[in-house]
Image: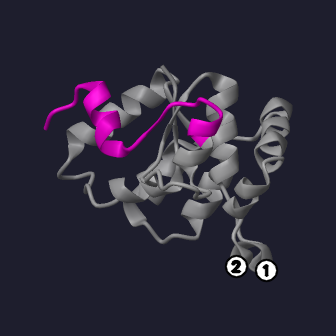
């Protein structure tokens, strides 16, 4: 099974210090080695602007997981934005500042690769959030806690 991580899930992991939570990071590395944990170039760009020390170091050591969107993924991003309500995935501040916006690319990556999105966003009725878009397009979406439970991790 492929899991496509959103920026906010990586951000949550930053609190788990690699020198203390060695097993957690080893499990993540094992998923990367098995090509079951991926993300997108846009997530990496967001992480580079985050200042999250532990995750940034891990991301640099695992740079291969941050894929460049394929033609199929880019086409699916267009499908997402063909729903007028979902155009709000790109906020006005991001538009004005030209900052990276990973959400539609994370969703498209999961769709094209038959994966599950891992995001800390919560479903809210009538919102333009990752879980809402995923539900609309029948793409599985879970949070980090559910991801760890699916992996049957205990620490």
Closer to the camera in the image, 77 or 40: 77
Q: Quadrant of the C terminus?
A: top left
Q: Secondary structure at mark 2?
A: helix
Closer to the camera in the image, 65 or 97: 97
Residue 56 is covered by the magenta coloring = no
**Residue numbers of the magenta segment:** 134-155
Q: Residue at x 65, y 54 (%)?
A: 102
**Location of residue 76 in the rendering, given as x and y in whole percent from the top left corner:** 79, 36
Closer to the camera in the image, 38 or 115: 115
Q: Which residue is mark 2?
A: 93
**Location of residue 2 in the rendering, given as x and y in whole percent from the top left corner:** 51, 25
Taking 93 as reference, is 132 left or right? left
Q: Determine whether label 1 and label 2 are within 8 Å by CB.
A: yes
> Neighbour class for label 1 at 10 Å: few (<14), some, many (≥20)?
few
Q: In which quarter of the view is residue 31 placed?
A: top left
Taking 144 as reference, is 57 left or right? right
* Residue ranking furthest to the front: 125
Taking 145 as reference, is 51 left or right? right
**Location of residue 34 in the rendering, given as x and y in whole percent from the top left corner:** 47, 20
Q: Residue at x 59, y 29 (%)?
A: 138
Q: In which quarter of the view is residue 89 placed?
A: bottom right
Q: Residue at x 80, y 34 (%)?
A: 70
Q: Which residue is mark 1?
A: 96
**Location of residue 45 in the rendering, given as x and y in whole percent from the top left corner:** 65, 60
């Amino acid at each position: 099974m492929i899991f496509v991580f959103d920026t906010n899930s990586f951000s949550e992991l930053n609190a788990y210090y690699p020198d203390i939570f060695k097993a957690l990071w080893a499990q993540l590395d094992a998923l990367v080695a098995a090509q079951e944990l991926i993300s997108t170039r846009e997530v990496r760009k967001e992480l580079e602007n985050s200042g999250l020390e532990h995750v940034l170091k891990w991301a640099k050591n695992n740079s291969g997981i941050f894929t460049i969107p394929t033609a199929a993924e880019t086409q699916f991003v267009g499908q997402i934005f063909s729903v007028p309500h979902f155009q709000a995935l790109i906020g006005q501040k991001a538009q004005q500042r030209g900052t990276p916006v990973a959400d539609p690319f994370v969703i498209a990556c999961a769709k094209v690769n038959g994966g599950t999105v891992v995001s800390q966003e919560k479903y809210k009725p009538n919102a333009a959030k990752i879980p809402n878009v995923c539900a609309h397009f029948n793409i599985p979406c879970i949070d980090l806690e559910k991801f760890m439970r699916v992996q049957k991790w205990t620490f």
